[in-house]
Image: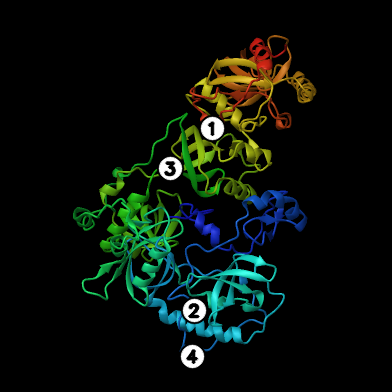
Amino acid sequence: PEKLQYSSKSAFSICYDKSFLSWLAPPYKGGTCHHCGLFGKLRCSQCVQTYYCSTDCQKKDWPAHRVVCDPIKQNNCFPFLRTVSENHTKRTEKKIPEIEDSPHCANSVAKCVPLSIGEEFSAVVSHIQNPETFFCQRMQSARQLAELEASLNEYCGKFPSNPSFRPAAGNACCAQFTEDNLWYRAAVTAYASEDTVLVDYMDYGNSDSLPLTRLRPMIPSLMNLPAQAIRCGLAGVKPPLGTWTSEGVSYMKKLVKDKVLTVKVVDKESSRSVVELTDASVTPEVNISSLLIEEGCATEEMRMALPAARVSDVEQANGEYVNKRMCKWIKLTLNQTLSVIVCTVYNPGEFYCQILLALNSLNKSLAEYCQKTPPRVSELENGDACCAFYSEDGNWYRAVVQNVISNGTFQVSFVDYGNTEEVPLDNIRPIPSSFLKLPFQAIKCWLSGIKPGNSKWNPEATTRFHMYTSGLELQATVTALSEDGAGVVLTDNSTDCPKVINKILTSEKLALFSCLTIVNIDNKHASLVILSVLTSIELAVDETMSVCITEVVSPDLFYAVPAPNKGKKKCSLFLIPVRSHCNKLVNRPFHPKLGEACCAQFSGNGHWYRAVVLEASQSAVKVLYGDYGNTETLPLSKVLPITDSYLKLPFQTITCSLAGETKCRCAELEVQVRFSPSSTFFLMCRKQMAVGG
């Protein structure tokens, strides 16, 4: 499925789709202030996505937010039947619904028409930008649309213009079209000036620039019908010289004008449906793409043919369900680092990741198979694999039955995405073994090295985690494996300064640090993972600074600390209470685990310092001194527990890897450090510097 689920009962579902959030105006609710992090109910009026607790916070955040603020614009479900200006004459009489004293539904947005790959329907083209972007309307909804517009015009005729009505970008409204002065459903895309807005007609696909006096508030009853404009792209063609010519666009308009066409959905993209258009009004019927190519207005675009559902697959549908042993999940290994997206979130302790592999071809083939296969008559059992219809987007996906509910309904888990839904038996198909060759792609995960402040995760932590991960390609480092999933460290490399999600949640006091459980992991990789979770100083890519190299493991792993400065003095002053703390705990038995922060007594001077355990045995531990960068093996009598209060100051050690041909095994944590000629000799001479030195 192509949306991202935020919780088990959220509107977000299976796989993230940027266009879903880019045009839907979210329901009115609160969120986390983008500036200060407090709860707030105010939203940016342009993108309608970013929350603030006050106008003061919004003003302070605007210099940064303006760079990414993207006014909401409907992508997939716009206006349609013909361009709004075309003949609207007789309309059916229908009593306008009762309206409330104060129409208030300006921020409602109509649902889009659900389409599935392989679906065919009769339609007219309502608006054309070019062969890659045009809008269709289904003929089966023409009467409903006419009745709705009759009601809409009657409603708008009763209300004069209201100077105080200023809908925000992304909000729905009634708009009076310039060319025929009739009223239509529209969505505000932007303000051209203080008193002029740009709108998209959600039932036709075309746009208009209107004064605010030609807008009226929307009411809920006028939003029941899905937006009738279906955003499409023509399959199998591309512009001959990289851009579409006016001649090519005009020729396509001529081919489709005033014609009822057969539309077949052959692919679905984030913001449109890729379709074949066929004109059956002539003999023999003609394909619009072929005519554009023959006329020289387009060239053929080779696309991968959809895998056809085989006869043997359909025949297998009449047999028994596949053996449960044929189902297999994707396998991970410790130390493994891979690119993922987070596709379903319950909380930071339970979410699902999906490896960035192409599921598209499998899902396309699955859709064609399910279109040809009748519903399953026999009952299902827990653990049975099947094909299930996902109601949110109208597509078919691989699933496993989790629970048999009464009245012929089953709770299924979508095994490539991690979310669940109750599905009636009519929306379930048997799954052939050929669709089970690809392992199930959803990986159940938890964030390693952190835990909730109380016994369970609070909603704010879940919200922030969702905000930091939604729609991003992340690097996941596997630090623990169990039958229930994988413990991971998630790193966001989308900015110049990599962000470790685990560490962000602890720094924002939404989670507590806990020991990392890392089994059979080498010292080099362990130190990288551990330091990524513990709070350490951060460097931006290409930042230049003077450092002292304290220990070299290899060109791919060496440790450095910033050259002495005021910050170093602060660290030294901070360590005084650490030593006092340790002097009170001397002779206390302590068996630290791998990855755990602790206090360690340096053999060179007998002083106590903050450290991290790299290796642990029954009688000794190897530690990395977090503020000095060198390592030492110590007996257990030389290490003591450390409290969270002593971990607030970031560790000073920087884990480094040489840039260039030499590759670090944890590439997402690489830090580029450029050394000036004047400091290189100094650094080289100090590379064996001791903790106490």
Which quarter of the figure has residue 31?
bottom right
Q: Is residue 58 visible?
A: yes
Across and down, in percent, residue 474 comes to: 52, 40
Q: Amino acid at mark 3?
A: Leu
Q: Residue at the spot x=56%, y=78% of the render?
A: 178
Q: Is residue 10 visible?
A: no
Label 4 with label 1: CB-CB less than 8 Å: no
Q: Is residue 427 left or right of residue 516?
A: left
Q: Amino acid at mark 4?
A: Glu
Quadrant for the N terminus, please. Answer: bottom left
Tell me the tag on residue 668: 1
Foreground mark, 3 or 2, reads 2
The residue wearing badge 2 is 85
Mark 1–mark 2 Cα distance, whole angstroms, equals 54 Å
The residue wearing badge 4 is 93
Foreground mark, 4 or 2, reads 2
Q: Nearer the viewer, residue 475 or 263?
A: 263
Indicate whether 307 appears above or below 643.
below
The residue wearing badge 3 is 356
Mark 4: which secondary structure?
loop
Number of dots carrying numbers = 4
Q: Nearer the viewer, residue 633 or 18?
A: 18
Q: Is residue 366 left or right of residue 59?
A: left
Q: Nearer the viewer, residue 658 or 536?
A: 658
Mark 3–mark 2 Cα distance, whole angstroms, equals 45 Å
Circle 2 crowding by C-alpha within 10 Å: few under 14, some 14–19, many from 20 = some
Among numbered discs 3 and 2, the one appearing first in the sequence? 2
Mark 1: which secondary structure?
helix
Q: Amino acid at mark 1?
A: Glu
Q: Amino acid at mark 2?
A: Ser
